[in-house]
Amino acid sequence: MATPTVSVIIAAYNAMPYVTRTLSSVAEQSIGQEQLEVIVVDDGSTDGTGAELDRLAALHPQWLRVVHQANSGGPAAPRNAGLDLARGKFVFFLDADDYLGPEALERMVTMAEKNGTDVVLGKMVGVGGRGAPTSMFRQNQPRTDVFTSRVYWTLSPMKLFRRELLERHELRFPTDLSTGEDQPFVAGAYLYASGISVVADYDCIFWVLRDDGGNVTTSTSGSEPRLRYLARMVDLITDKVPPGPGRDRMAHRHLTVEVRTLIHWHLKLETRDSQRRTLARLAEIIAPLLHDGLREELSAMAWLRLHFVRHEMLDELLELDRFEDELNASGVATPLVVDKGRAYAQYPYFRDPVRAVPDDCYDVTDQVGVRHHVSRAELRGTTLHLAGYAYLHRVATDDVTTELVLRERDSGTEYRLPVTHTATPRLGAHEDQGRYTYDTAGFEAAVGIDSAADGAPLGDGLWDISLAVGAQGLSREVRIGSKRASDVSGVSDTRVVDTTRGVRAVTLYTTKPHGNFTLDLGEKKHRVVSHLKLEAARWNASTPTELLITGRWTLGAYPEGPLTLVLGNDEGATSDFPVTRTAHGDTFTARVPVTDLPAGLWSGELRLSGWSVPLPRLPKDLAAAKWRRRGVPWYAKPVSGSGAAFALRVAKTDLVRAISGKLKP
């Protein structure tokens, strides 16, 4: 029997009617049934699940195998039983009430094979109101790990695993855990894997919220089972990962997600004595992960919660949980206190003399949001004009010190420019139920290319534009442009301007994908010649000896006069011809009276100060122009065989050859 590519393992317990759709989604996989084996372990179901599985297995014996066993009390044992029987190169664990997108397995296998990775996460989508993790699915990740991505924030087993990895490290689900059994298994696979991939551009797995509330992951059985698997995970992390940023990144997940869940959904429902025991045990479990350096990884709310846990401050912990509930329900952000350039959230017991909680537990300086909006961004001559508003969320606009910041992307060279502060009455009244307003958040700025570098001209480079938004001694920097008025264009605007350093190219544009403004000086990304397009050459219908060369220009501006058409011949002669721009529009025309050209083979280019664009080849069917100069016939005609280059022959007519040509029979 051929080795299947994927073994799909399903642990089923009282999964009717969901399991039928689950198996249908597997049968319809684009990878093909011949590449699959499906092992369903019925863990002592009592609702007809076993009979339905047997019916389906009889219809599809070539790829579906059903195993019946006595109820084990959790998904670990049936998953292990399926894994022991699996023969596939890869293994995918699927819950009996969820289902797959049609291309899910094919896409995940392709990702693993192409990148040589051992674990592949497919994008998960909640169905029927069930939540699904999202932070790790912002974009495809061909190869990553738990320390440089968000993959550790999903520890469910619904992933593609290379079976050789699981067997080599003897990875199995711990059967002594009634919940959270997937975490040690998946975390171990993550850490042992040679690489992890993420498929984010396709909905692979659909997590279904059951109508009967039967999802294992949404049911509760108190604090004790969660304390047990949390302790197991702390042991795994401290055993497998040395102290440092990697361990802290993994600890972050458990010290926020697990601790908050345990307190909010379980501890607060227990009796007082049980609460004290649970809290003491929780403090003991997380102690190996806690150190002061971890503070930078966590929000102030999370750090405050952990302070209450490790000091076993039960009443304060429960009050913080109640406060957080109200905060989430109200949608009104917590007031701040700004003191000596730091911002502190007024969470419960802030500077309470009895509790004496350190200010560090309330410090949200690095989390203070900056709101901004650009109402003007335009180049005029050598000056960039900017206007809009910017403020620190929850910080009143008193003692405003906002500055404009120009920072060259490669060198890091930075210049700070003053702005004019303007009134913005009632700004902020639309959010936080109007609790905070920002009456002096407006700004206006003029950035002179010739003077922005501390009075000197800005050098060539990509100058990213930011605001250092300041008030009450607190300052936060933000790139600007992503929030702008509908009439403020984000399209790149390239111009050629006269400056004290001569004619220079300048482009105001917005970055992708974030849409922030950057000033390009010196064509680092935006070429001037790409905005000059020569389109056609023809004889003037009213003056048949005048060659008209037309084109289009998409420059925002350039100085008057310097756009010129220059022709030169093989004898060293040159002639310049002015270019006329249309009064309205983006077209231009150069007029070349060929009667004024000396004899020779002429080539040419369009010049704009220091830039030039070669003239295109003349049309092959362009007729020769003819005229007389001092009674002698002359002509001008295209020259073939010159490739893509402009080539115009101007010469006297050879009368002998012309006459002999006419006399030939």
Image (tube, rainbow, N blue to C red):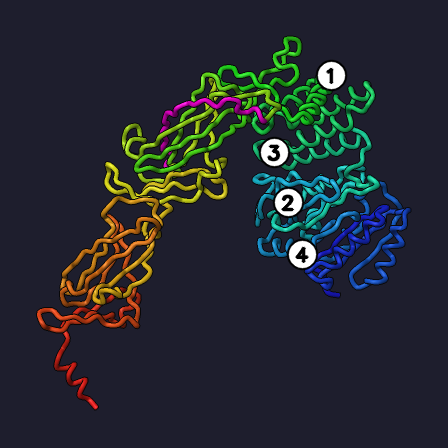
Query: Do we see residue 180 in this rendering?
Result: yes
Q: For the view shown, which residue lies furthest in the front direction?
A: 542
Q: Classify mark 3: helix, strand or loop.
A: helix
Tell me the amino acid under the disc marked 4.
Glu
Between disc 1 and disc 2, the foreground one is 1
Q: Which mark is residue 247?
A: 3
Mark 1–mark 2 distance (CA, rounded to whole Å): 41 Å
Q: Nearer the viewer, residue 564 or 163?
A: 564
Start-end of magenta stretch: 411-430
Return the residue found at the far bottom. Answer: 665
Foreground residue among 372 and 296: 372
Labelled disc at residue 103: 4
User: Within the magenta stretch, is there residue 415?
Assistant: yes
Q: Quick one: label 4, few (<14), some, or many (20+) residues within 10 Å?
A: some
Question: What count of labels does the image hold?
Answer: 4
Q: Residue furthest top?
A: 353
Seen in the picture, residue 1 relative to 354 is either above or below; the reply is below
Type of amino acid under label 1: Asp
Of the two numbered discs 4 and 1 in the rendering, the one whose residue sits closer to the viewer? 4
Distance from Cα at disc 4 to Cα at disc 2: 27 Å
**Earlier sequence position, callout 4 versus callout 3:** 4
Tell me the CA gap for discs 1 and 3: 30 Å
Q: Secondary structure at mark 1?
A: helix
Mark 2 burial class by Cα count in 10 Å: few <14, some 14-19, many 20+: some
Residue 78 at x, y = what percent? 81, 47
Q: Position of residue 604 (x, y in %)?
A: 23, 60
390 or 380, which lies in front?
380
- Say whether marks 3 and 2 touch (CB < 8 Å): no
Residue placed under numbered mark 1 in the picture: 315
Mark 4 and mark 2 in contact? Answer it, CB < 8 Å: no
